[in-house]
Image (cartoon, rainbow, N blue to C red):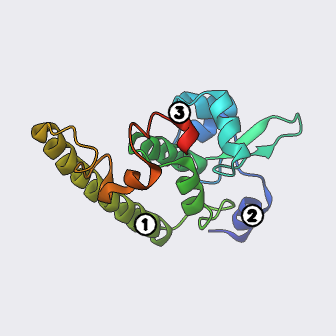
Amino acid sequence: MPSHTLTSALTSPPPTSKLAISGNDASPDDRLTMAEVIARTGVAASALRFYESRGLITAERSSGNRRLYRRHMLRRISLILVAKRLGIHLTEVADVFASLPCDRPPTQDDWQRVSRSWKRQLENRRRYLENLEHELVGCIGCGCLSMKACNLLNPGDGLRARGPGPVRLDDSRR
């Protein structure tokens, strides 16, 4: 690469707008307008502003004060959407994203670390749901309606300490 081309590439700002969406010259550092991000992700403008306010994504401002998102924010937005579908809370997403760089695209190692973290969370959630299913199937199949014996609604007969009767319905005993 000629030195003047390298110097030009380092000093000129990354391309924005239509070139950033189409063409083979796309770079992870390209800036996309909010409209372009909405078109690519299907996420509403209000959601983008919310994610930004929570630190999940970042945007720069143009000279006209318009939000410009680096192209690699598309992956963050996609992961937010996937996490929501998997039942991962945005606070958990924020915790994981806190370890990722915002000023540059994350590396493969960064994404693998995130993937391992979420895999552990999903495995724990799966075990919890399997145990809950087992308890619920047992409870429905039992039909005992005994608050004393029911391990799902009253584990270890913990409600006994709150007194006799329908203690779950009586707020004055809480």
Residue drawn at 60 percent across, 48 percent down: 73
Q: Residue 86: where, in percent of width, then height?
A: 38, 45
Q: Between residues 34 and 156, which one lies in front from this camera angle?
A: 156
Residue position for label 1: 117
Q: How many marks?
A: 3
**Do labels 2 and 3 touch, CB within 8 Å?**
no
Q: Between residues 23 and 106, which one lies in front from this camera angle?
A: 106
Q: Earlier in the sequence, mark 2 or mark 3?
A: 2
Label 2: state its secondary structure: helix
Q: Residues within 10 Å of mark 2 (few under 14, many from 20)?
A: few
**Do labels 3 and 1 touch, CB within 8 Å?**
no
Give residue 99's quadrant in the image. Answer: bottom right
Q: Between residues 74 and 28, which one lies in front from this camera angle?
A: 74
Residue type, mark 2 in image: Leu
Looking at the picture, does residue 120 appear above or below residue 165?
below
Looking at the picture, does residue 125 appear above or below residue 26?
below
Judge whether residue 83 can be spotted in this image.
yes
Residue position for label 2: 10
Say left or right for 123 vs 39: left
